[in-house]
Amino acid sequence: MGAWDVTNGWDDGSVMYRPVEWGDVDAVADAFEATWPQRPPLGGTPTGLLVSRYFTLHYFALTTEGRVGLVAGDGVDETVAGTLDDEDFAGVTLVRRVGQPQLFPQAVAEMEDLKKLIGANPAGAAALARMEHFFAIEGMLEADSDVDLTSDTELELFLVGPAARGRGVGGALWRQFLADLTDAGVRNFFLHTDSGCDYAFYERHGLTRVAERLHADHPEDLEFLGVTGPVDEGPQEVPLADDQFIYRGDVARVAGGAGA
C-alpha cells in the first residue's frame, strides 16, 4: 500500500493518507455538499451550506477513529498539520467503535450553534426536521435488526471527493478501514446507506443487507416532507425521500475480498 510513516500515514502514489483531524471538517463538509447538494430552495444558499456542514458534524461528533486521503504533492507539512483545502481533499472514512472515546466532542457545541442559525430560516427549519426524521428512521432500523447488539463498530461516513474519483481512493480507504478493524480485533461492523448512494458497492464487497425501509411503502413521508401534490419527477426530487438500508459485514470475510 505504499509507504509513509509520518503520523501513521501512507501513500498510494498520487494520493496520501493519514488519521483524520478536526482541521479537516471544512474540506469534508465541502465535499459532502458537492456530493449530496441541498435541493431548492436551499441549494446553493448560505443556509444550504450550513445544513451540509451540520450533517458532516453529526458524523464527526460520533467518530472515534478515521482516515483522510489527500492529493499528494502539496507537501507533507500540511498533511501533518491536519488542515486541508478543497484541492487537497481526496476522501475520508469516519468510524465509531463502541467503548472508544470520541475524537471530536467539540462538534456537538458547533452543531447546537448551527441549529440556531439554520432554524432561523423557515426552509432551514424544515430541513432540520427532515434530518431528524431521517436519523430517527436509522435508529428504528438499528433496533429492528438488532445490528447494534451484534456489531460493535459502525462506518459513519465513507466519502470520496468528486475530483478524486477514479484514482483508487475509495478502494485504498476501504482496505485500510478493514485493516484497522482487523488489528483492533473487531469481528463485525455495520453501516447505514440509502438509494442516493452507491450501495451496490457494499454488496459487491460481501456485506449483507440486514434492514431496509423503502420510501414507496411509506406515503406518509411525503406529507411529513411537505409534499402535498403529485411528485412528477419521482421521489428522488424530494429531499431525504430515499430508500434507507443497513448493511452488515463480517470483517474477516469482507477483508478477504477487499481487493475485488
Image (cartoon, helix red, strand yellow):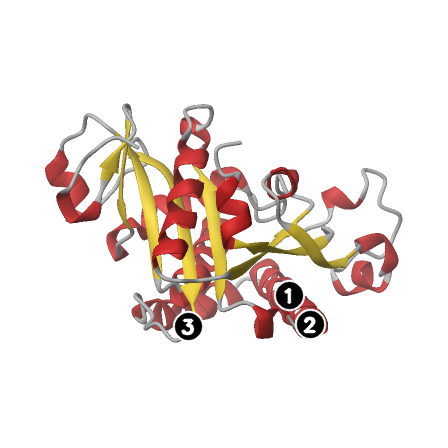
**Quick check: 142 left or right of 104?**
right
Tell me which residue sits at (29%, 29%) in the image.
Answer: 12
Question: Real-space Cα distance between discs 2 and 3?
Answer: 24 Å
In the rendered structure, are the residues bearing label 2 and label 1 in contact, judged by CB atoms less than 8 Å apart? yes
Give whichever of 118, 215 is nearer the camera: 215
Instruction: Tell me which corner region of the image, top left, top right, bottom left or bottom right, holds residue 210.
Output: bottom right
Give the mark toward the camera: 1 or 3.
1
Q: Which residue is mark 3?
A: 112
Callout 3 amino acid:
Glu
Of labels 2 and 3, earlier in sequence is 3
Q: Position of residue 245 (x, y in %)?
A: 69, 55
User: SS of the residue at dot 1?
Assistant: helix
| In this view, 68 is above or below 73 | below
Q: Quadrant of the N terminus?
A: top left
Residue corresponding to mark 1: 138
Mark sitting earlier along the chain (1/3): 3
Q: In the image, which disc is placed on residue 140?
A: 2
Asked which secondary structure carries label 2, the reply is helix
Q: Nearer the viewer, residue 148 or 228?
A: 148
- Residue plotted at (62% across, 68% down): 147
